[in-house]
Image (spheres, helix red, strand yellow):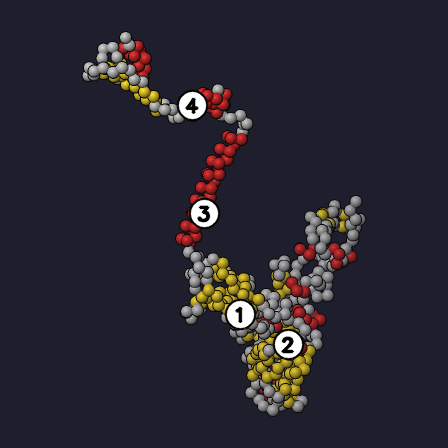
């Protein structure tokens, strides 16, 4: 069952609108509302609206504005929308403010955007009426408030300047800050002499919160009662990275208005020692590693710059990046290159460390792409030869060792008698037979066997006169012929 709560400021009202506040816990949770009409004892049915988160639907009211005139300047004091309420109490850093101002006589507007609760508009015309209005912008929600009511104020008149001349001194102008070792150098412009100066600082974050707008500025001890428009103070005087500085002139009881408030980001003025450089060559590439030599806090968020050149040439090439590791490619072989480096603090491209000592080294030989290509092809060809040779050897070995039984031809050879084996292993026997017919009844046969380990044999019969006839027949028919010639 839903637990409906009555809204004290929205009971028995005669209009169709009411204003109310919620508990802090209810601002960021889904909430439903319902309304009904009443007349005497008669009531209508409840009309409910779809639930929503009040913080997302809330209307941003106009900021509070208070003006203060100074010498050719207007100081604008801004209070957060809904000041004292719960809706925007935790949204201080989510607001920025747009100030629209103009000379009342001309109507030409100018804009100033700020996130601080005090903003000084400088370099205005004296004895002039200026009007302005302010709107608040919520950065996360993207919502804008209505403009505040228009307010007008006169800058200090010339008559007032003459009246105050004995009491008010000119304002120091054009504040500048530089770094000198571990110190800041603060300087400003001032024409008068025989005056002394003092400087104060304020953490930046205090200018964004209401309690800090009128909060205590802190003195800079080294810049108290200085006689020149310049002072030097240690960087550890301020314990924050971002802060404001302002200067005031004084002479006896007479003082000037405070100068403009100069915002200082310490990282822009941090002095860093030169880095160290290590270079190596890999093939045709130059690898450069830059190392910061300061404390870890100073070495964060750096930008790195290197210059490199051939030692035979003074033409330097510059490379900048956020990484300390550089790779320079496609360099010619056997060439001496030199490298130097420096670093820039975060958010500053105008202040840097000094350059490191230069480091030189020669590129390696044999870095030509053609040589690499030929070498690669040679390796591939050699690998292919090894592969196919190995494959062939493995094939033969697998054939030999796949079965213990010898091949059929060898098996048949060893299964036959020894004598046959010997005949198979001896060379082919050559035999020649000659028949000499000496007479009709006598025949001489000479047989030569050119067989190993046998002597030549000759057979002689009774000779007679040569008739001049002879016969030479093939071995296959020799036996038949001899038998036919015998008596």
Residue 433 visible in the current orientation: no
Q: Quadrant of the N terminus?
A: top right
* Identity of the residue furthest to the top in this view: 487
Q: Position of residue 447 (x, y in %)?
A: 32, 19
For residue 342, which numbered disc appears in the image?
A: 1
Q: Secondary structure at mark 2?
A: helix
Which of pointers 3 and 4 indicates the residue nearer the eye?
4
Where is mark 4, residue-wise?
A: 424
Residue shown at 48%/38% (left/top)? 390
Tell me which label, 4 or 2, sits earlier in the chain. 2
Which of pointers 2 and 1 indicates the residue nearer the eye?
1
Where is mark 2, residue-wise?
A: 235
As displayed, is residue 7 above or below residue 477? below
Q: Residues within 10 Å of mark 4 (few under 14, many from 20)?
A: few
Q: Secondary structure at mark 3?
A: helix
Q: Secondary structure at mark 4?
A: helix
For residue 351, which numbered disc appears in the image?
A: none
Q: Residues within 10 Å of mark 2 (few under 14, many from 20)?
A: some
Q: Position of residue 319 (x, y in %)?
A: 49, 65
134 or 14: which is nearer to us? 134
Residue 461 visible in the current orientation: yes
Tell me which label, 1 or 3, sits earlier in the chain. 1
Tell me which label, 1 or 4, sits earlier in the chain. 1
Q: Position of residue 330 (x, y in %)?
A: 44, 59
Which of pointers 4 and 2 indicates the residue nearer the eye?
4
Q: Residues within 10 Å of mark 3 (few under 14, many from 20)?
A: few
């Amino acid at each position: 069952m839903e637990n409906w709560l009555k809204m004290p400021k929205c009971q028995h009202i005669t209009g169709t609108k009411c204003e109310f506040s919620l508990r802090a816990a209810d601002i960021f949770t889904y909430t439903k509302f319902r309304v009904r009409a009443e007349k005497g004892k008669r009531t209508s049915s409840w009309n409910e609206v779809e639930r929503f988160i009040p913080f997302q639907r809330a209307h941003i009211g106009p900021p509070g504005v208070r003006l203060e005139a100074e010498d050719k300047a207007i100081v604008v004091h801004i209070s957060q929308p809904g000041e004292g309420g719960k809706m925007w109490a935790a949204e201080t850093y989510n607001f920025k403010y747009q100030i629209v101002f103009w000379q009342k006589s001309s109507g030409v507007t100018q804009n100033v955007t700020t996130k601080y609760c005090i903003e000084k508009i400088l370099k205005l015309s004296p004895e002039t009426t200026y009007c302005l209005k302010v709107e608040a912008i919520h950065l996360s929600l993207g919502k804008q408030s209505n403009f505040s009511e228009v307010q007008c104020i006169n800058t200090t008149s010339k008559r007032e300047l003459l009246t105050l001349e004995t009491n008010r001194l000119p304002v120091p102008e054009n504040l500048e800050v530089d770094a000198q070792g571990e110190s800041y150098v603060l300087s400003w412009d001032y024409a008068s002499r025989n005056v002394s100066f003092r400087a104060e600082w304020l953490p930046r974050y205090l200018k964004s919160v209401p309690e800090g707008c009128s909060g205590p500025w802190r003195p800079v001890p080294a810049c108290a009662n200085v006689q020149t428009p310049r002072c030097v103070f240690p960087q550890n005087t301020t314990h924050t990275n971002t802060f404001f500085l302002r200067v005031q002139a004084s002479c006896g009881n007479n003082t000037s208005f405070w100068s403009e408030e100069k915002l200082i980001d310490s990282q822009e003025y941090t002095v860093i020692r030169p880095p160290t450089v290590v270079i190596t060559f890999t093939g045709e590439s130059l690898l450069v590693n830059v190392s910061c030599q300061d404390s870890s806090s100073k070495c964060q968020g750096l930008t790195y710059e290197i210059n490199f050149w051939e030692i035979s040439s003074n033409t330097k090439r510059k490379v900048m990046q956020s990484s300390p590791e550089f790779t320079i490619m496609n360099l010619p072989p056997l060439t001496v290159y030199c490298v130097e480096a420096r670093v820039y603090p975060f958010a500053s491209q105008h202040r840097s460390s000094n350059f490191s000592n230069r480091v030189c080294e020669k590129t390696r030989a044999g870095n030509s792409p053609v040589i690499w290509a030929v070498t690669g092809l040679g390796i591939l060809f050699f690998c292919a030869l090894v592969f196919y040779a190995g494959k062939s050897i493995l094939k033969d070995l697998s054939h030999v060792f796949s079965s213990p039984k010898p091949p059929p031809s060898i098996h048949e050879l060893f299964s036959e008698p020894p004598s046959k084996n010997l005949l198979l292993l001896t060379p082919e026997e050559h035999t020649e037979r000659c028949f000499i017919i000496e007479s009709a009844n006598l025949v001489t046969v000479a047989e030569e066997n050119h067989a190993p380990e046998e002597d030549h044999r000759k057979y002689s019969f009774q000779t007679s006169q040569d008739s001049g006839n002879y016969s030479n027949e093939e071995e296959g028919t020799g036996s038949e012929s001899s038998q036919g010639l015998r008596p």
